[in-house]
Image (cartoon, rainbow, N blue to C red):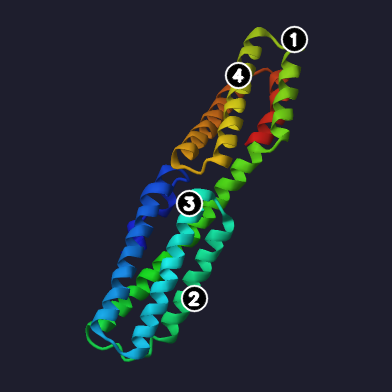
């Protein structure tokens, strides 16, 4: 398993993150589990067996914590996951000088690589989720409703021409849909809910870029505060 197989720049924060990216982590986890079990079966040396048991237990804990984070968004769980991975790496480093002869050496080396790859992917996964959470939080806070109400009240004053008003209301509706999808995502941590949020965000951004080029100065002035808040 090699990180070169992944085009990191093309990883989105939506479905690719929660399917292909997580699938790769799962494959690495299963490979590591196989390596741990193989070590136990091939060589029953006390030190090696103890090392394999420790790594296996930590790996089980890391998997449980990662799944907890995936389904609940509990940051403490993914932090515990990171601690378990670091402890695995420390054990592997400490026991690297043991007499890993024959097949056990190959398996130990493979397990070392898998755990290190898992660590890198975990950090990337956590970073992507942090970006996602910050983006969602920025549009799901209570003041987002005040921003929308302020914009709607200004549009109701009747100072804009009809064409500008139509475009402005289209953006207002898009802002509202974005806010709603963010609120859903804060309580429902699923691939589909994030996909909906990501699509709403991209749609709003594309619509603003398109509409702002056609708006009057007055329309741009009214919409700018809302756009600054939601982007």
SS of the residue at dot 1?
Answer: loop
- In primary-sequence order, the first of circles 1 and 2 is 2
In three-dimensional space, the C-alpha distance between marks 3 and 2, rounded to whole angstroms, equals 21 Å
- In primary-sequence order, the first of circles 3 and 4 is 3
Disc 3 residue crowd, few under 14, some 14–19, many 20+, Cα 10 Å? some
- In primary-sequence order, the first of circles 3 and 2 is 3
Q: Tell me if label 1 and label 2 are in contact, CB under 8 Å.
A: no
Disc 1 residue crowd, few under 14, some 14–19, many 20+, Cα 10 Å? few
Q: In this view, does 126 lie above or below 164?
A: below
- In primary-sequence order, the first of circles 1 and 4 is 1
Q: Residue at x 68, y 35 (%)?
A: 229
Residue 190 horizontal side relative to residue 220, left or right? left
Q: Nearer the viewer, residue 8 or 153?
A: 153
In three-dimensional space, the C-alpha distance between marks 1 and 4, rounded to whole angstroms, equals 18 Å
| Mark carried by residue 100 | none
Q: Nearer the viewer, residue 76 or 127?
A: 76
Q: Is residue 116 above or below residue 152?
A: below
In three-dimensional space, the C-alpha distance between marks 1 and 2, rounded to whole angstroms, equals 64 Å
Q: Which label lies toward us, 3 or 4? A: 3
Q: Is residue 85 above or below residue 150?
A: below
| Mark carried by residue 158 | 1
User: Looking at the rendering, which quadrant does residue 58 occupy?
Assistant: bottom left
- In primary-sequence order, the first of circles 1 and 3 is 3
Q: Name the residue under label 4.
A: 214
- In primary-sequence order, the first of circles 4 and 2 is 2
In three-dimensional space, the C-alpha distance between marks 4 and 2, rounded to whole angstroms, equals 57 Å
Q: Where is residue 206 in the image (x, y as percent from the top left)?
A: 53, 29
Q: Mark 3 points at which residue?
A: 70
Q: Where is residue 203 in the image (x, y as percent from the top left)?
A: 52, 29
């Amino acid at each position: 398993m090699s990180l070169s197989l992944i085009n990191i720049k093309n990883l989105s924060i939506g479905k690719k993150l929660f399917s292909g990216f997580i699938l790769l982590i799962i494959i690495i986890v299963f490979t590591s589990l196989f390596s741990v079990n193989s070590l136990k079966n091939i060589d029953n040396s006390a030190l090696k067996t103890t090392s394999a048991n420790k790594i296996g237990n930590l790996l089980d804990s890391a998997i449980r914590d990662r799944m907890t984070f995936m389904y609940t968004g509990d940051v403490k769980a993914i932090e515990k996951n990171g601690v378990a991975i670091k402890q695995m790496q420390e054990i592997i480093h400490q026991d690297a000088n043991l007499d890993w002869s024959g097949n056990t050496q190959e398996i130990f080396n493979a397990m070392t690589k898998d755990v290190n790859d898992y660590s890198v992917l975990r950090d990337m996964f956590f970073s992507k989720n942090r970006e996602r959470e910050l983006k969602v939080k920025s549009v799901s806070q209570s003041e987002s409703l005040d921003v929308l109400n302020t914009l709607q009240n200004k549009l109701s004053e009747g100072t804009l021409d009809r064409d500008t008003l139509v475009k402005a209301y289209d953006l207002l509706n898009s802002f509202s849909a974005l806010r709603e999808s963010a609120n859903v995502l804060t309580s429902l941590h699923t691939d589909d809910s994030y996909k909906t949020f990501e699509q709403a965000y991209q749609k709003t951004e594309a619509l603003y870029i398109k509409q702002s080029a056609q708006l009057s100065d007055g329309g741009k002035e009214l919409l700018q505060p809302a756009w600054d808040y939601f982007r």
